[in-house]
């Protein structure tokens, strides 16, 4: 893997993390859910089954880049960081958040993510295009060569799927995870619905901090 010298220059390195929620504004664009009722005749049971299917689709939307909305962005540069939350669930609110994201990222030259190639980066880039905004700096999407972006998950999993979570690798490296509330990414939508913005921000910032620590270990181990 080729890596530029600035990869080990901590002054210009940042880790970032995104949290997402379903973008309910696109539901009307999606195909209507077809529920197989089988031998069910009871209208209430049929209705309940359809509601369950709608709930499951909503949960999945939070992970799909063109069906979700960025609700939180956090960064960590080794010493300090920050979290920014989407208080207004709207296109205008997300657009404002994305502007803030690029204003922060443009200060750096090297970027660390965890599964950023398959999650954070595609979401950030496509949502930037959706609102007619412009990237302020290019973050390499190349999975197999570290240019100015190290995806810790891709490195540690050897580009294979389902090879451990961020929490797993934090423990594997002997790092303090800081996740003493048992929260996972699957809880973000419910927390957002409850307007528990503080918990979301803390969770996202903690992920960015752990990602930086893991990425720093990896970068320092590489032969340049």
Image: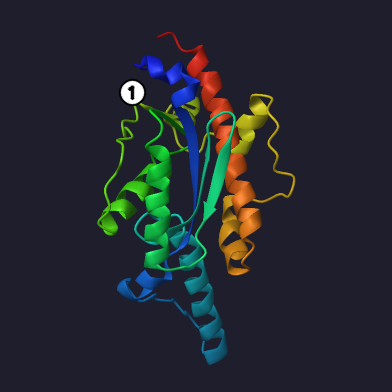
**Residue 53 image point, x, y percent:** 49, 72
Quarter of the image for the C terminus: give it: top left
On the image, which quarter does residue 120 sit in?
top left
On the image, which quarter does residue 116 sit in?
top left
**Residue 66 image point, x, y percent:** 34, 58
**Residue 37 image point, x, y percent:** 47, 80
Residue tagged 1: 145
Residue lying at 40% horizontally and 34% vertically, measured from the top left: 107
Q: Is residue 119 visible?
A: no
Q: On the picture, is 30 further left or further right than 188?
A: left
Q: Is residue 128 visible?
A: yes
Residue lying at 56% horizontally and 85% vertically, measured from the top left: 45
Relative to residue 170, is residue 3 depicted above or below? above
Q: Which of 116 and 88 lies nearest the eye of the viewer?
A: 88
Q: Which of 168 and 32 lies nearest the eye of the viewer?
A: 168
Label 1: few (<14), some (14–19) or many (≥20) C-alpha neighbours in 10 Å: some
- Circle 1 — which element? loop
**Residue 141 image point, x, y percent:** 31, 35
């Amino acid at each position: 893997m080729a890596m530029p010298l600035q990869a080990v220059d901590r002054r210009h390195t940042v880790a970032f993390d995104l949290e997402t929620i379903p973008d309910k504004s696109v539901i009307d664009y999606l195909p209507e859910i077809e529920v197989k009722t089988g031998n069910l005749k009871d209208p209430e049971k049929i209705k309940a089954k359809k509601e369950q299917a709608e709930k499951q689709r909503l949960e999945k939307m939070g992970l799909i880049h063109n069906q979700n909305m960025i609700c939180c962005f956090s960064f960590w540069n080794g010493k300090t960081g920050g979290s920014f939350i989407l208080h207004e669930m709207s296109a205008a609110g997300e657009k404002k958040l994305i502007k803030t994201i690029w204003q922060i990222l443009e200060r750096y030259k090297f970027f660390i993510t965890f599964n950023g190639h398959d999650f954070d980066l595609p979401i950030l880039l496509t949502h930037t295009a959706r609102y007619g905004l412009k990237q302020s700096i290019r973050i390499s999407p190349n999975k197999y060569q570290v240019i100015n972006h190290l995806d810790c998950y891709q490195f540690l999993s050897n580009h294979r799927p389902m090879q451990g979570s961020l929490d797993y690798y934090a423990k594997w490296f002997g790092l303090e995870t800081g996740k003493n509330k048992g929260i996972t990414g699957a809880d973000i939508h419910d927390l957002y619905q409850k307007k528990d913005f503080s918990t979301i921000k803390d969770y996202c910032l903690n992920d960015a901090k752990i990602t930086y620590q893991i990425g720093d270990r990896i970068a320092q181990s590489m032969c340049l």
